[in-house]
Image (tube, rainbow, N blue to C red):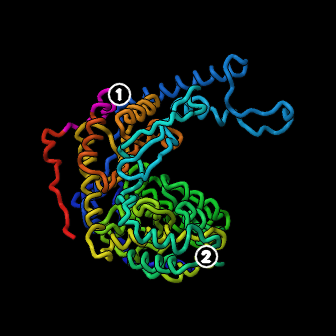
């Protein structure tokens, strides 16, 4: 297991400080990053004015005070208790429910719970239909009215390339495979669950990524959580970005390896951990670490930021570490032909030891993959928990991925895949620029289709989502504890399937709502020439 991931040695290019910069500019230490970056790399993380932070903490404080007051009223029977409680017969048992642990859910989340788990009754394309529901007890329970809210603009699904569709002609091959294989495998990959469709898909994925081999799994989350423990264990060191997805965090914890966290996209923080790991080794024994592996994501799904891959690769080569790259949100979404952040930065797939991605976003399907050297993939075929215990990917899903990937590669005889990638990039830049122009604070990279718009105050989370739904726009809102307490946000996911008319409808609604809720916190001046943000329409002929 120690030799499955072999390090690469090369002359180290000293990494610059972690700050947003143009590729031609120099950092504070005077070192140009022009040797690392082949294109401009711009990200935005504007700080809110101080009064916004103060009012946000004040809002949470008021909510907490009233929460304790309502808990007091429930305890004395002055208000109905809707949460689970211990039975009187078990009063001497160890408590099963901890009241304080559920304080936030009980008193704050419940007030705005209607903004989540909304049932959709159509394909999650650029528009979808919602089942209307109402509550009679302040969101503790819901009842359906029987009415359907039609043609809601979908700004929350990860349908980056628009492959979540129901077009009969597009899904013709999927229908054929469904009739041929059925819906399920009923076995694991190591037993009776490997089909010719899986082998075809794995060869296609390896070809698409430009690596030796690949292995596919039926669940994207489990691709991380069940494979990281197979690659590292006791005596190994994991260096994980502080904003990594829960699947990476869970996989790291299950591995039994030592975990150390570096600041998000901060190369100084990462290099310090790498240097200390080399110098001091393992705690107490001071023996060298068996393996040091860096865990990062391509696009961070809550921040909209893109990993600083050239700098991380330089560091991992200098310190002989391994690199595990999760491209769940970046594969298909960035890069000239949709091949992820490796292509986006013009780098070689060989620079990354373990390439991971999912098919649940850009490909409109389910599952994930691990790709890289053949000996790495062969090792996982034997030792991966998913290969041993998890049911294989169902054939119609595999065919949907094959269909979408062939479209991206142009193997279907058209340029539709390339058109989708370019349209996504065009929509992303247009949407982000217009939001900047309006005065909103948004996070992330200019090329990231994940667009977080900062709301900050807890009272505005529910108001924002409800008002947007009234305008037939479906959005995802996120607050504490999923984000820092002062950084509640709405997260928009731009799709190639969004038309300019749809985006303008959303932007007009945001402009109006931003004034109504006073959400335009940006201190940068607005553009006096918004027409410059209009991009010429670029399409390819089939």
Which circle marks residue 517 in the picture?
A: 1
Mark 1: few/some/many CA within 10 Å (<14, 14-19, 20+)? few
Where residue 162 appears, x then y in whole percent? 35, 58
Q: Quadrant of residue 307?
A: bottom left
Q: Is residue 518 magenta?
A: yes
Labels 2 & 1 near each other (Cβ < 8 A): no
Where residue 203 appears, x then y in whole percent? 45, 80
Question: Taking the image as drawn, is residue 319 in sight?
Answer: no
Which circle marks residue 385 in the picture?
A: none
Q: Secondary structure at mark 1?
A: loop
For the residues marked 2 and 1, what is the alpha-carbon distance in whole angstroms? 53 Å
Q: Which stretch appears magenta?
A: 512-526
Query: Which of these two is toward me, 148 or 246?
Result: 148
Per the image, the residue denoted by label 2 is 193
Above or below, comparing residue 3 to residue 140 in the picture: below
Q: Is residue 167 magenta?
A: no
For the C terminus, which image quadrant? bottom left
Query: Is most of the magenta stretch helix, strand or loop?
Result: loop
Question: Taking the image as drawn, is residue 498 in sight?
Answer: yes
For marks 2 and 1 on the same chain, the one whose residue lies earlier in the sequence: 2
Q: Residue at x 42, y 44 (%)?
A: 129
Query: Which of these two is toward me, 275 or 5?
Result: 5
Q: How many marks?
A: 2
Where residue 377 appears, x then y in whole percent? 53, 78
């Amino acid at each position: 297991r120690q030799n499955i991931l072999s390090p690469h040695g090369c002359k180290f290019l000293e990494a610059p400080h972690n700050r947003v910069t143009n590729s031609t500019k120099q950092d504070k230490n005077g070192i140009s990053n022009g040797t690392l970056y082949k294109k401009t790399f711009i990200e935005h993380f504007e700080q809110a004015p101080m009064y916004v932070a103060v009012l946000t903490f004040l809002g949470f404080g008021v909510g907490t005070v009233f929460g304790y007051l309502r808990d007091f009223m429930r305890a004395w029977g002055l208000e109905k208790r809707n949460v689970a409680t211990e039975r009187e017969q078990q009063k001497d048992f160890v408590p099963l429910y901890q009241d304080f642990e559920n304080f936030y859910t009980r008193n704050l989340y419940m007030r705005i719970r209607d903004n989540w788990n909304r049932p959709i009754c159509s394909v999650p394309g650029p528009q979808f239909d919602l089942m209307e529901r109402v509550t009679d007890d302040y969101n503790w329970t819901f009842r359906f009215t029987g009415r359907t809210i039609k043609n809601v603009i979908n700004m929350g699904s990860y349908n980056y390339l628009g492959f979540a569709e129901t077009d009969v002609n597009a899904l013709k091959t999927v229908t054929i495979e469904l009739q041929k294989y059925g819906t399920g495998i009923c076995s694991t990959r190591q037993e009776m669950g490997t089909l010719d469709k899986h082998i075809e898909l794995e060869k296609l994925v390896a070809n698409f990524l430009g690596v030796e081999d690949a292995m596919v799994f039926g669940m994207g989350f489990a691709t991380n959580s069940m494979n990281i423990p197979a690659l590292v264990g006791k005596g190994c060191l994991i260096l994980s970005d502080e904003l990594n997805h829960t699947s990476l965090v869970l996989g790291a914890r299950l591995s039994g390896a030592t975990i150390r966290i570096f600041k998000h996209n901060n190369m100084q923080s990462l290099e310090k951990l790498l240097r200390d790991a080399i110098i001091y080794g393992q705690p107490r024994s001071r023996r060298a670490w068996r393996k040091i592996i860096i865990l990062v994501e391509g696009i961070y799904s809550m921040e909209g930021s893109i990993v600083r891959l050239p700098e991380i690769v330089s560091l991992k080569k200098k310190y002989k570490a391994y690199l595990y790259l999760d491209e769940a949100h970046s594969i298909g979404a960035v890069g000239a032909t949709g091949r992820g952040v490796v292509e986006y930065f013009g780098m070689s797939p060989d620079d990354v030891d373990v390439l991971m991605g999912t098919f649940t976003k850009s490909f409109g399907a389910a599952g994930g993959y691990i790709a890289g050297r053949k000996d790495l993939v062969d090792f996982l075929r034997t030792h991966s928990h998913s290969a041993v215990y998890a049911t294989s990917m169902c054939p119609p899903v595999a065919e949907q991925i094959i269909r979408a990937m062939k479209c991206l590669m142009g193997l279907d005889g058209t340029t539709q895949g390339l058109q989708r990638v370019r349209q996504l990039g065009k929509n992303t830049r247009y949407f982000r620029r217009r939001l900047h122009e309006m005065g909103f604070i948004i996070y992330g990279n200019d090329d990231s289709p994940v667009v977080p718009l900062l709301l900050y105050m807890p009272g505005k989370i529910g108001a924002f989502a409800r008002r947007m739904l009234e305008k037939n726009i479906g959005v995802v809102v996120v607050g504490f504890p999923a984000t820092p307490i002062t950084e509640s946000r709405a997260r928009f996911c731009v799709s190639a399937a969004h038309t300019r008319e749809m985006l303008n409808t959303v932007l007009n609604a945001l402009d109006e709502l931003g004034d109504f809720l006073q959400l335009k916190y940006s201190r940068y001046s607005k553009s006096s020439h918004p027409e410059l943000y209009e991009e010429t329409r670029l399409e390819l002929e089939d």
